[in-house]
Amino acid sequence: MDLTEVSQLCERFKAAFVRKDFDTCTDLLSQLKVLLTKFRSLPPLFENTPNAVNELLLAREIYEHAVVLSVKIEDQDAFERDFFQLKPYYTDAGSRLPPSQQEYLILGLNLLRLLVQNRIAEFHTELELLSATALDNPCIKHAVELEQSFMEGAYNRVLSARQTAPHETYVYFMDLLAKTVRDEIAGCSEKAYDYLSINDARQMLLFSSDQELLEYVKEEHPEWEVKNGSVFFQKAKESTPCKEIPSLQLINQTLSYARELERIV
């Protein structure tokens, strides 16, 4: 199959993407990925074939759509695979191709994914690889500011950042991050308090209405008890098993270490 035929299949893929027919997109994407393996100009070979630039541009566009598609279908594993297939087109082939308008959007999405998955070390590693120009881009800055707010525990800023997301595709990861934040607050709350009034619990968990709070409790924490205008955590505490400290085993180990040290001295 030549470049023209792959381009035509790509147009069908993009048309299905526009009409939000994601099942067809997934099927066509699988076909496109197989066909791209026949182009020797693509990573990892990067052979200088007559149509190398056009083939690289087409492949880059396909993988960019693949990354966004993975967000649309809420598949984080597919996102990671497609992002790593796309990345060489921004790095290794970057000097041979004109800049992509989607590059910073997708790099920002990847930073957001790492933040959602609590892979903070990888987040900073990716950040170190970015140029000064990239760091000034709104998509990248949004992810960086989110990470700073998350690390500072400024959870209200994390949740309000959803309203200022630089692109609609960011909303999926923003919602996941909001859930992570609320789960963190919920875990601390049930350890710190026996109960909270519904009003206090709503404010602490950063919900805008009592109804949102009650739905969250029903779906995420059925072990909590809502009665008399309060949320009771005691039930959750009772259901958490208390781990015994193996004191006798620790004493024996300590004495054993002491005897070994005496022999060495």
Image (spheres, rainbow, N blue to C red):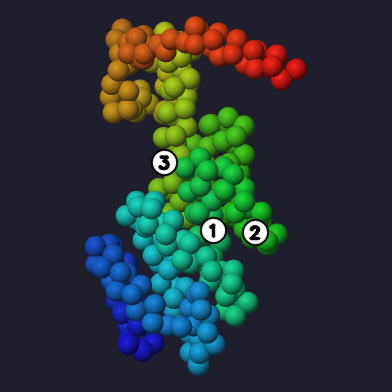
Residue 107 is tagged as: 1
Give the mark, 1 or 2, whose residue is nearer the N terminus. 1
**Disc number for residue 169:** none
Q: Quadrant of the N terminus?
A: bottom left
- The numbered disc on residue 130 is 2
Residue under the image location 28 percent in, 65 percent down: 26
Report the front residue among 196 and 112.
Answer: 112
Nearest to N terminus: mark 3 or mark 2: 2
The quarter of the picture where residue 207 lies is top left
Assess disc 1: are there few (<14), some (14-19) or many (≥20) residues with their C-alpha within 10 Å of its C-alpha: many
The residue at 47%/24% (across/down) is: 185
Q: Residue furthest bottom?
A: 50
Query: Could you tell me residue 146's position as x and y percent?
Result: 57, 42
Outermost residue toward the right in this view? 265
Give amino acid for label 2: Leu
Residue appearing at x 42%, y 13% in the figure: 243
Name the element at disc 1.
helix
| Count of numbered marks | 3
Residue beneath disc 3: 176
Q: Amino acid at mark 1?
A: Leu
**Residue 51 spot, x, y in % from top left:** 48, 89
